[in-house]
Image (cartoon, helix red, strand yellow):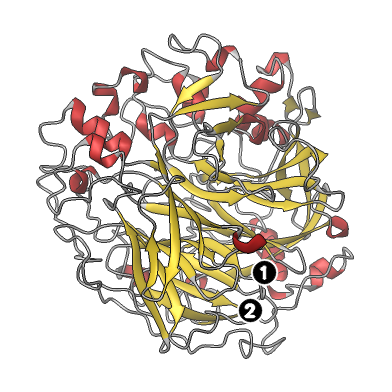
């Protein structure tokens, strides 16, 4: 996600759990870090050792030389690798017009073009010749939000209904058809599968919140459909070939009342929002007039990329919160398990376990994500943990999920998911973002990007899973489910890495990275060989300043989960976030997104703020539209044609 887009004040109203003795807490946290496998071994669920020199130490598993930090306004890769521009903001999805250098495209044009700020992404191979193709398929690409200072000529000056319409058309999802040719990867145009899904696209509502009174509006008195999906951050992909796009900072698009209600406060609905000003020309984003409209966002949305006429479906059984992603795996009995993070300070990690199993070629998959149990994670101080069920009627020491606490039925539990997790007593985390499951061992990894408020006098709640005060660099936590079964209700956990700068004079900010250091981990992905790919999201205002002075631009690294060895594989252009990673089945191509290159503090079009600080991608790739920086998808390959990261 965009690192500066979260609310400056967390919305967690439950009291932070603390130990009576802060010194004891620090000792216990240090013990967990120092004995990465030791605490877990006592539970019978050992994880790989992180001791220096263990495993392959980045030898065969990391078959490239790490690059140095870079502040160049371009994509930088190791020797022997190359990148090509595939799909940039304003490029036609199918047969639409190409974006103009001065961004004077209409809202109608933008609805047929790549949106802004590419984020999560997945490659769906075509079934050419009866097997998954590595040179032909569909890419589903999220567009997280809009930078109205770049989207419109004149930014937000002379704000109008047309500018609101264009901004709504620039968010959502792109589905494009791509093919590898002798000249490289190309978008297939026209394509019968290509489409744009925007903030105005009709979506169905499914699951326990369908028809709930809190989801009804004047336009939808039955609570069964909603216009649009927005702030689409990370994602997931199902075994049956559908795409899960995740609505994250939805609250920022709404204007709330001067004094928000308790539920609105819990989800960050306030009078100012994030400054998008959609409500001025589309009144459904005015929560003072339509108080239920914000309840219709904050969901995981399922899209069938091969069925362009099927509407997206909001799967409410997966809970309503600021979804960063929805990582899918299967339990031992083939029930579907979805791991999710709520990306805000002091928020939670969730998983959903379906009631029915996934049986390839048998049964109906259209409702698999509508029935099951939603859980929230509690990380205990001893390296063990529990998944706490968020079921209607469930009782916890803090209270019951029952009528007296505002939960009249299952629909209330998923709509007021954060409040349910508060009552359950889950562990408040340092902005949980992407989650990845190791392909062989099944260990689960999550990035905790940062939390500068952790451990401050106002917010003292340190715990073993979030052990650092003023955690500006973030960390990565991993766990092993009980019995190595994704449906288990108990797990063992440790901290895989504390991000930081080994040159920082403050020992608390040095971290413990073995190899190339990084800060603010965000994107996370495993390749087929078991390498962990880590993408960073240091905010534009922090890049190359203060404690981040030695890191260069945002980057993508690769880690050996066994040894912890880490190497920097890629650096991005000025001001960008590196995000969204997926691969062709043969491993010869990595698709990666470059989000908000050159974004400035004037992203809302304030003429008093600085202008963009990047000329990418036009300064690197011949033929790219210039005029202003553009988020884009790139394809990375090896010059010798072998897999990017061979098994």
Q: Secondary structure at mark 2?
A: loop
* Vertical arrangement, residue 304 with respect to residue 43, above or below: above
Q: N-terminal of the two: label 1 or label 2?
A: 1
Residue 100: % across, % down: 16, 51
Q: Is residue 613 visible?
A: yes
Quadrant position of residue 354: top right
Residue linked to disc 1: 30
Q: Nearer the viewer, residue 122 or 455?
A: 122
Residue linked to disc 2: 560
Q: Residue at x 44, y 16 (%)?
A: 291
Quadrant position of residue 480: bottom right
Q: Is residue 173 visible?
A: no
Residue 120: % across, % down: 48, 53
Q: Quadrant of the C terminus?
A: bottom right
Disc 1 crowd rating (10 Å Cα; few below 14, some 14-19, many 20+) is: few
Q: Nearer the viewer, residue 14 or 156?
A: 156
């Amino acid at each position: 996600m965009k690192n500066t887009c979260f609310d400056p004040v967390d919305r967690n109203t439950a009291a932070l759990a603390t130990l009576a003795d802060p010194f004891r807490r620090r000792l216990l946290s240090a013990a967990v870090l120092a004995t990465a496998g030791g605490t877990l071994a006592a539970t019978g669920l050992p994880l790989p050792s992180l001791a220096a020199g263990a495993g392959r130490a980045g030898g065969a598993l990391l078959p490239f030389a790490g690059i140095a930090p870079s502040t160049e306004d371009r994509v930088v890769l190791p020797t022997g690798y190359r990148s090509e521009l595939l799909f940039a903001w304003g490029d036609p999805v199918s047969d639409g017009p190409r974006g103009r250098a001065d961004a004077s495209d209409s809202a109608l044009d933008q609805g047929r073009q790549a949106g802004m700020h590419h984020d999560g992404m997945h490659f769906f191979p075509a079934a050419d010749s009866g097997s998954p193709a590595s040179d032909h398929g569909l890419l589903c690409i999220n567009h997280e939000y809009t930078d109205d200072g770049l989207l419109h000529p004149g930014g937000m000056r002379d704000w109008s209904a047309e500018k609101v319409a264009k901004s709504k058309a620039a968010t959502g999802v792109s589905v494009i058809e791509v093919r590898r040719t002798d000249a490289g990867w190309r978008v297939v145009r026209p394509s019968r599968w290509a489409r744009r899904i925007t903030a105005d696209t009709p979506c169905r509502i499914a699951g326990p919140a369908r028809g709930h009174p809190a989801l009804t509006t004047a336009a939808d008195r039955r609570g069964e459909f909603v216009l649009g999906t927005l702030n689409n951050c990370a994602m997931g992909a199902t075994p049956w070939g559908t795409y899960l796009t995740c609505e994250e900072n939805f609250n920022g698009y709404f204007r709330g009342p001067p004094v928000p209600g308790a539920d609105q406060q819990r989800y960050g609905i306030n009078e100012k929002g994030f400054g998008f000003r959609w409500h001025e020309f589309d009144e459904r984003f005015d929560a003072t007039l339509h108080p239920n409209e914000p309840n219709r966002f904050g969901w995981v949305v399922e899209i069938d990329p091969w069925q362009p006429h099927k509407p997206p479906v909001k799967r409410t059984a997966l809970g309503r919160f600021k979804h960063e992603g929805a990582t899918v795996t299967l339990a031992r009995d083939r029930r579907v398990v979805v791991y999710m993070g709520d990306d805000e300070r002091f928020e939670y990690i969730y998983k959903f376990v379906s009631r029915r199993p996934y049986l390839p070629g048998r049964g109906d998959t259209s409702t698999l994500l509508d029935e099951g149990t939603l859980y929230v994670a509690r990380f205990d101080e001893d390296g063990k943990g529990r998944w706490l069920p968020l079921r209607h009627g469930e009782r916890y020491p803090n209270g019951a999920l029952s009528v007296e606490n505002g939960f009249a039925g299952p629909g209330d539990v998923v709509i007021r998911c954060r409040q349910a997790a508060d009552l359950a007593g889950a562990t408040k985390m340092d902005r949980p973002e992407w989650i990845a499951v190791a392909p062989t061992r099944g260990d689960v990894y999550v990035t905790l990007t940062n939390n500068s408020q952790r451990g401050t006098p106002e917010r003292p709640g340190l715990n073993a899973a979030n052990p650092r005060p003023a955690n500006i660099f973030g960390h990565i936590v991993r766990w092993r489910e009980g019995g190595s079964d994704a449906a288990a209700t108990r797990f063992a956990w440790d901290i895989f890495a504390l991000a930081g700068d080994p040159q920082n004079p403050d020992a608390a900010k040095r971290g413990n990275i073995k190899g190339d250091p990084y800060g603010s981990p965000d994107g996370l992905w495993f390749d087929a060989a078991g390498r962990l790919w880590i993408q960073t999201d240091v905010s534009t205002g922090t890049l190359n300043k203060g404690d981040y002075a030695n890191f260069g631009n945002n980057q993508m690294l690769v880690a050996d989960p066994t040894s912890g060895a880490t190497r920097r594989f890629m650096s991005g252009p000025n001001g960008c976030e590196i995000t969204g990673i997926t691969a062709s089945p043969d491993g010869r191509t990595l698709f990666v997104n470059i989000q908000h290159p050159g974004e400035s503090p004037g992203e809302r079009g304030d003429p008093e703020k600085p202008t963009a600080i990047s000329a990418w991608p036009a300064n690197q790739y011949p033929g790219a539209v210039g005029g202003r920086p553009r988020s884009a998808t790139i394809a990375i390959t090896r010059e010798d044609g072998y897999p990017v990261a061979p098994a």
